[in-house]
Amino acid sequence: MLEIIKKISKRIIGNFFRRKDNIKIGFYGPPNSGKTSLANRICKDWVGEEMGKVSNVPHETRNVQIKEQVKIKNKGKNLMFKIVDTPGIATKIDYEDFLKYGMKKSDAKKRAKEATQGIIESIKWLDDMDAVIVVLDSTQNPYSQVNITIIGNLIARKIPVLIAANKIDLKKADIKKIESAFPEYKVVGISARDGTNIEEFYGSLFKLSKEV
Amino acid sequence: MKRIRGLSLHVIPFSEVQKLSIGERVKKILNLVLGNKIVILHGRLRPEEEARLIEDTMALVDHIKSFKGIELAVIEPNIKGKNILIKMKHGLAKRLVGDNSCLSVIGPASVIKEIKRDPRKLELWLN
């Protein structure tokens, strides 16, 4: 009997520390919201190297990218994260949209095919996350169904959410619109490009990790 | 009155999809969308059904040459700021008969260019 109690307590304590010490954090959002830019900023700050390529052509990230063992320090505390950067989720893909960026037809078609598969991959990974940062472009209308679908799925799976309102360095940025669209969630305005407000973001990330 | 050529709306009452499985609901919607119809669903899909709809849409985009995907939007009743009784009534009705107080609009991206949504209205921009 004593042995069983010992085993159960060891498992509970083990799980508690494992979850708290290696949090799998996903970056979700629509295409071109700056998920990879933010993941790059974090990785550069704490690991010294970037995670993936960024571009102004939508669907640059077409595969899930993972960075293990990202140790982040905030107010004297350390936490270990596994960063999972996902392809942007969209409801439509048209290769002709890529032609506008000067891409060759064959390359545009290839990119469109990879993008559709990337979206499917992103959705499949939802079940595997401990917590999620939803990265939204604060210059865009937040009331898009894709944003609502992503957040709805995170709520249904009871996954803690933090909203990063990215691109606040741009004139058109409107964080208040994002806050009023998702009033139940903490929204942190940031610029992944120039690092504005990144310290507040790390503080919020630590608070989010307590909910895991 | 001017008729918009090629625009076809298909209304699905909530009772028609209520007892279908996730796969069957999504298949029913996508079959209509593939026929170039704009689907007006009385009610809304659950989050996991919306995710499945996007997954299946992407699989179709990958396999059907002329299919570019879908546009999707939901209009919900605005109960924010309403008194607790109205909120309870809404919650109870949702539990008893499902979430049929919303309207979902799902259409082919080749027909609908964009759906602009704010909390109170939907604007459909056609191609």
Image (cartoon, coloured by chain):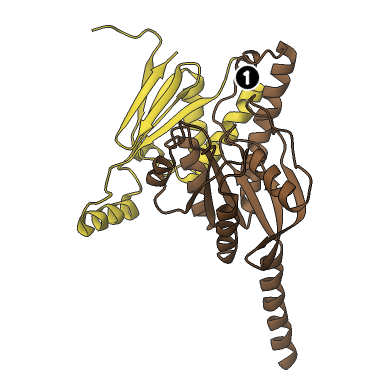
Chain colours: A brown, B yellow
- Dot 1 surroundings within 10 Å: few (below 14), some, or many (20 or more)? few
Q: Relative to A121, does residue A42 appear above or below in the rendering? A: below
The single residue placed furthest to the bottom in the displayed view is A2
Q: Residue A132 location, x and y as percent?
A: 59, 51
**Snapshot quadrant of residue B76:** top left
Q: Measuring 24% from the left and 55% from the top, which residue is drawn there?
A: B89
Q: Nearer the viewer, residue A87 or B28?
A: A87
Q: Relative to A75, does residue B120 appear above or below in the rendering? A: above
Q: Measuring 40% from the left and 43% from the top, which residue is drawn there?
A: A176
Q: Nearer the viewer, residue A77 or B123?
A: A77
* Rendered-image quadrant of the N terminus of chain A: bottom right
Q: Measuring 70% from the left and 23% from the top, which residue is drawn there?
A: A111
Q: Is residue B6 left or right of residue B83?
A: right
* Rendered-image quadrant of the C terminus of chain A: bottom right
User: What amino acid type should be assigned to the residue bearing mark 1?
Assistant: Ile
Q: Residue B24 location, x and y as percent?
A: 51, 37
Q: Relative to A42, does residue B103 appear above or below in the rendering? A: above
Q: Is residue A144 left or right of residue A11?
A: left
**Snapshot quadrant of residue B84:** bottom left
Q: Report which residue position mark 1 lands on.
A: B64
Q: Secondary structure at mark 1?
A: loop
Q: Nearer the viewer, residue B52 or B120?
A: B120
User: Chain ID for label 1?
Assistant: B
Q: Measuring 46% from the left and 19% from the top, which residue is drawn there?
A: B113
Q: Residue B3 location, x and y as percent?
A: 30, 8
